[in-house]
Image (cartoon, rainbow, N blue to C red):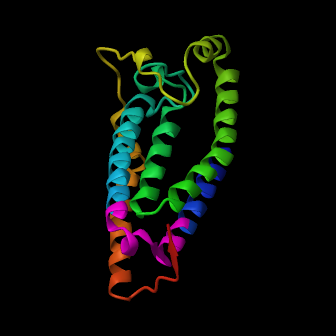
């Protein structure tokens, strides 16, 4: 139930952002195009890192989400790498707009919403894997990865059918920079009016 609510809220927020992107444009495009270009490039880099990171997480977690405590690969560096990479991707989408406002809005929304999601999921894992999870919590940071903790096995059993289902959710960030460029093109040919100019 909570998972469905989280997905619903995330989709509503994404739709609101898309609508705002559709009716606004970057002030930097006119005043300092180099800043807009640098922001877009930073956005693409973050989206690329996020997509690969989410795909990496999906290899380990696909089909094992709560039944098994995953502590290898990205999950050896932090307890919530999927959300860490999701934040990078969301910020990347924000920067791809060529503004500072969108990534700031995304960061604020994440800070106010996702700690509750993470706490809820960790409570569930504590109930399912108490002793093992307590050790995991003591040794692995909650959110920001610690690279020195990385441990990867020589072999890992991946469930292809489940992994295939996870590919789209792992890579959906890739679509957004293209959508943003398309919207900017529609603004340029005056097919969609730009009501707001934002930094």
Residue 34 point in image, percent of width and height: 31, 63
In the image, residue 118 sits, relative to residue 168, either above or below, namely above
Q: Is residue 99 above or below residue 20?
A: above
For the point 37% across and 63% down, which residue is it? 36
Query: Magenta includes 34?
Result: yes
- Viewer-closest of 159 and 145: 145
Of all residues, the one furthest to the bottom in this rendering is 190
Look at 50% across and 37% down and name the residue there: 84
Span shown in magenta: 17-36
Left or right of 11 in this view: 194: left
Q: Residue 113: percent from the left, percent from the top?
A: 67, 47
- In reply to whether residue 178 is colored magenta, the answer given is no
Q: Magenta stretch: dominant SS?
A: helix
In-front residue for pair 142/6: 142
Q: Is residue 11 visible?
A: yes
Query: Is 122 positioned to the left or the right of 139 in the image?
Result: right
Q: Residue 110 appears at what percent x and percent y?
A: 60, 48
Q: Residue at x 42, y 64 (%)?
A: 97
* Residue ranking furthest to the left: 154
The image shows residue 55 at horizontal and vertical percentages of 36, 39
Residue 162 visible, this angle: no
């Amino acid at each position: 139930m909570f998972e469905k609510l989280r997905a619903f809220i995330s989709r509503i927020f994404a739709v609101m952002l898309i609508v705002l992107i559709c009716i606004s444009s970057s002030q930097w495009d006119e005043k300092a195009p180099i800043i807009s270009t640098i922001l877009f490039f930073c956005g693409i880099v973050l989206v690329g890192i996020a997509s690969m990171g989410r795909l990496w997480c999906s290899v380990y977690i696909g089909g094992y989400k709560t039944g098994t405590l995953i502590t290898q690969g990205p999950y050896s560096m932090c307890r919530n790498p999927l959300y860490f990479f999701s934040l990078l991707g969301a910020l990347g989408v924000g920067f791809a707009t060529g503004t500072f406002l969108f990534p700031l809005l995304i960061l604020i929304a994440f800070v106010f919403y996702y700690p509750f999601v993470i706490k809820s999921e960790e409570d569930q894992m504590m109930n399912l894997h108490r002793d093992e999870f307590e050790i995991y919590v003591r040794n692995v940071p909650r959110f920001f990865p610690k690279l020195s903790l990385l441990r990867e096995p020589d072999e890992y059993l991946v469930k292809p059918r489940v992994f295939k289902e996870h590919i789209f959710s792992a890579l959906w960030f890739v679509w957004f920079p293209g959508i943003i460029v398309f919207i900017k093109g529609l603004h340029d040919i005056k097919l969609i009016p730009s009501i707001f100019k934002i930094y």
